[in-house]
Image: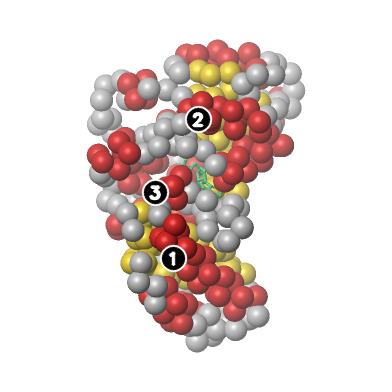
Amino acid sequence: MPIKLATTVAGLRTEGARLLGSGQGRSQGLVPTMGALHEGHAALARAAVEQNDVVVATIFVNPLQFGDAVDLDRYPRTLDADLALLEDQGVDLVFAPPVEEVYPGGEPLVRITSGRLGEKWEGASRPGHFDGALTVVAKLLHYGLPAAGLPAAGAAPGGLPAYRAYFGQKDAQQLALVRRMVADLNFPVEIVGVPTVRAVDGLALSSRNRFLSGEEREAALVLSRALRLLEERADARQPLDLDSARALVESQPLVGLDYFEVVDPETLEPLAENCRQTPFSGEALALIAAKVGPVRLIDNAPLRS
Ligand code: AMP
């Protein structure tokens, strides 16, 4: 079926309800994006299509999460190509509203507070970013509620449709925050994390990569190489030796390292000594952020030992 486009909440609700229909055991997936879509977004859409009867993707560049008006203005907007990519993955409906539809009264007076979890790492470099991001995610999750009634998270007792939303592990802090928001505030949706999609040379796909020159892109590979080093050590149950991985990044003159830490995957608190000295057991997350030329890049690697 050709993909449908809604630009109003009313249109989304009507078309969503029509697609979902009625009957037992129905499910709906939601894939929130800011557009300028690439294979990473396609992986989210494919996971949603595999697991749900109806899939809605959203495309909205959210002014509330940009600290810098220039960054907001230059964020790439490629709607036609995005619709084609989503249609190829089997997405049923795209919600791509104008700013006034999402914020009819201008900036909202009340917003979601990302709390302590939102103040560290990316939040420290981008004050207010996660409050803005969570606020729009909360709105999008509500707009996308399957129209047949209030669904239960995941399973669907009593015939209510299941509701799942898909987020990339690429944005690990955002994923952790969305999981906490949904758990702490009792949103009736199951959050599904999708592994990071990379280019063959290891660079994590990002809509911002297009702003890197050839030389900068080459330099940026040091981020995924450094993460790989930690993964290899974790797999071999050796001390992580974060210092030498950090030195590798700092040896690249075009890369300005912001942070590189090994943290608890849920609280994002640094693990003791960043596991420098001793092999760790269980799960950890290596987080890295750096400026490469004009672009701020983030990447991460789940570690298991
Ligand atoms: P964005 O459009 O950049 O806000 O991203 C929309 C969703 O796609 C978020 O959940 C991101 O984490 C996810 N995403 C972005 N890049 C990737 C990637 N390389 N691999 C997997 N998911 C990604």
- Distance in Å between CA atoms under marks 3 and 1: 13 Å
Q: Which residue: 59% across, 28% down?
A: 84
Query: Which dot marks residue 59?
Result: none
- What secondary structure is marked by label 2? strand
Q: Secondary structure at mark 3?
A: helix
Amino acid tagged 3: Phe
- Name the N-terminal-most of marks 2 and 1: 2
> Which residue carries the number 1 mark?
219
Residue at the far right in the pictured view: 24
Q: Nearer the viewer, residue 256 or 219?
A: 219
| Residue in the foreground of this view, choosing between 258 and 293 | 293
Q: CA distance from mark 3 to mark 2?
A: 23 Å
Camera-side mark, 3 or 2: 3
Dot label at residue 58: 2
In the rendered structure, are the residues bearing label 2 and label 1 in contact, judged by CB atoms less than 8 Å apart? no
Residue 211's label in the rendered image is 3
Q: Nearer the viewer, residue 271 or 259?
A: 259
Cα separation between marks 2 and 1 = 33 Å
Give the mark, 3 or 1, whose residue is nearer the N terminus: 3
Give left or right: position of 106 versus 195. left
Local packing at callout 1 (Cα closer than 10 Å; few below 14, some 14-19, many 20+) is some
Residue drawn where x is 62% and y is 43% of the image? 43
Q: Position of residue 248 (x, y in %)?
A: 45, 77
Residue 117: x percent and y percent?
A: 38, 55
Between disc 3 and disc 2, whose residue precedes?
Answer: 2
Q: Amino acid at mark 1?
A: Ala
Q: Position of residue 101 (x, y in %)?
A: 37, 20
At 63% across and 81% down in the image, what residue appears?
A: 237
Which colouring convention does the figure follow?
A: secondary structure
Mark 2 vs mark 1, foreground winner is 1
Picture coordinates of residue 122, whole percent (x, y): 36, 56
